[in-house]
Image (tube, rainbow, N blue to C red):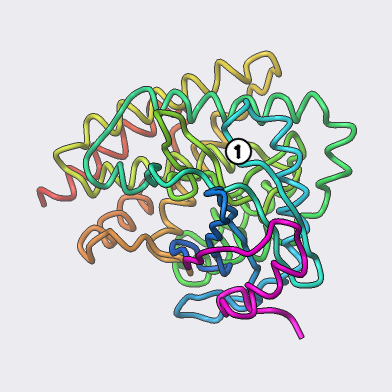
């Protein structure tokens, strides 16, 4: 029978039997994700591990299932990102137990903050957006340069489809009929592009800030595919927070533009001329999905949810072709809608 890592008595016995570290001294259930059990383990020497165990049924209000075998993808992705990403921007891989659908990685020291919480508190630091753009660009560029190997290593996209395309684009297409054609085409286009490793969950929620450095987490939907999805996914969070936080709106939108410029400079040697227009469409698709899909943004008010839905439906009729125009048009439409 599979161990439940949230059963701390069972977990203690498991770790003593599985490792040579001695006895763990404390356990803490971590919050944040809906697709995994996550526990912080502290050892006698003060070091920590984070254990993640994939769930088959996600902790959301609608039926949403995904094979826990995706933990194998996460383990493989973390090992590769330890090599591809700049040092210190991903936690070190420790172990994988495929039978129990869990992995362990080093814990980031307790003084860290979650970047999503930082942004929602109104703290907008330009350097952090530069780091985020650079980190994504480096991962995309280096993996594209190793495409011969990585396109085979991460060829499987089933977990990305069940955790992203289906609950975000295809479910929203069923719920919002005027956007159906746009979202269905976008989902198909995403599967047709095979250019680089795609994180698939590249957002502030999955990013820690420790001593001024951003550290990227959560790799369960990593695959070799369309890098524009990552860009659109990230921009969605910046624009949605800019929508929600009126006093920080200008700073967030400027920072979103900075993120894109740093990212694009990093990947420019690859000659991906079409990535900007695809990134715009992915941003619009995700902006709508995060108010009408299976994983809505919890901080948006009902009024903001309706406004974002209405604004995106208007914009997808003739989408902008540049990220700068996307940011400008989105904030203009939001402010016009708020005044009416």
Count of numbered tags: 1
Asked if 270 appears above or below 103 in the picture, the reply is above
Front residue of 232 and 48:
48
Residue at 83% from the left image edge and 48% from the top image edge: 155
Residue at 81 percent across and 71 percent down: it is 99
Task: Tell me where residue 243 appears, x and y as whole percent.
Answer: 25, 46
Q: Residue at x 62, y 61 (%)?
A: 51
| Span of residues in magenta | 1-29
Q: Which image quadrant for residue 220?
A: bottom right
Crowd rating for badge 1 (residues with CA inside 10 Å; few <14, some 14–19, many 20+): many
Asked if 204 appears above or below 162 in the picture, the reply is above
Residue at 23%, 45% in the rendered image: 121
Q: Is residue 212 visible?
A: yes
Corner quadrant of residue 273: top right
Give the image location of residue 294, x and y in percent. Answer: 48, 69
Q: Nearer the viewer, residue 233 or 146?
A: 146
Q: As drawn, is 250 to the left or to the right of 177?
A: left
| Residue 317 in view (yes/no) | no
Q: Position of residue 330 (x, y in %)?
A: 31, 39
The reply to whether the magenta stretch includes residue 84 is: no
Farthest bottom residue? 1
Which sits in the foreground, 233 or 47?
Answer: 47
**SS for dot 1:** loop
- The reply to whether the magenta stretch includes residue 19 is yes
Q: Quadrant of the N terminus?
A: bottom right
Q: Which residue is mark 1?
A: 90
Residue 83's x, y, as percent? Answer: 74, 31
């Amino acid at each position: 029978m599979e161990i439940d890592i949230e059963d701390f008595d069972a977990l203690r016995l498991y770790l003593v039997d599985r490792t040579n570290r001695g006895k763990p001294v404390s356990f803490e259930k971590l919050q944040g994700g809906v697709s995994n059990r996550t526990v912080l383990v502290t050892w006698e020497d003060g070091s920590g591990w984070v254990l993640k165990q994939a769930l088959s049924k996600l902790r959301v209000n609608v039926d949403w299932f995904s094979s826990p075998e995706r933990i194998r993808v996460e383990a493989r992705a973390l090992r590769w990102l330890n090599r591809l990403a700049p040092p210190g921007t991903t936690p070190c891989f420790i172990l994988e137990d495929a039978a129990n659908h869990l992995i362990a990685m080093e814990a980031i020291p307790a003084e860290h903050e979650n970047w999503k919480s930082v942004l929602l508190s109104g703290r907008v630091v330009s350097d952090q957006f530069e780091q985020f753009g650079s980190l994504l660009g480096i991962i995309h560029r280096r993996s594209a340069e190793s495409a011969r190997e990585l396109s085979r290593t991460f060829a499987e996209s089933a977990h990305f489809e069940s955790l992203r395309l289906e609950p975000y684009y295809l479910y929203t297409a069923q719920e919002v009929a005027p956007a159906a054609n746009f979202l269905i085409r976008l989902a198909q286009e995403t599967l047709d592009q095979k250019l680089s490793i795609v994180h698939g969950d590249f957002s502030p929620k999955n990013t820690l800030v420790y001593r001024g450095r951003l550290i990227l987490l959560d790799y369960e939907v990593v695959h070799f595919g369309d890098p524009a999805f990552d860009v659109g996914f990230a921009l969605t969070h910046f624009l949605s927070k800019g929508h929600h936080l009126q006093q920080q709106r200008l700073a967030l939108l400027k920072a979103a533009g900075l993120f894109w410029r740093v990212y694009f400079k990093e990947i420019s040697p690859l000659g991906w001329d079409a990535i900007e227009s695809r990134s715009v469409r992915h941003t619009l698709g995700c902006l709508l999905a995060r108010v009408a899909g299976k994983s809505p943004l919890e901080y948006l008010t009902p009024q903001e949810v309706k406004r974002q839905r209405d604004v995106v439906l208007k914009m997808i009729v003739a989408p902008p072709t540049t990220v700068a125009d996307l940011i400008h048009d989105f904030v203009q439409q939001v402010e016009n809608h708020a005044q009416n």
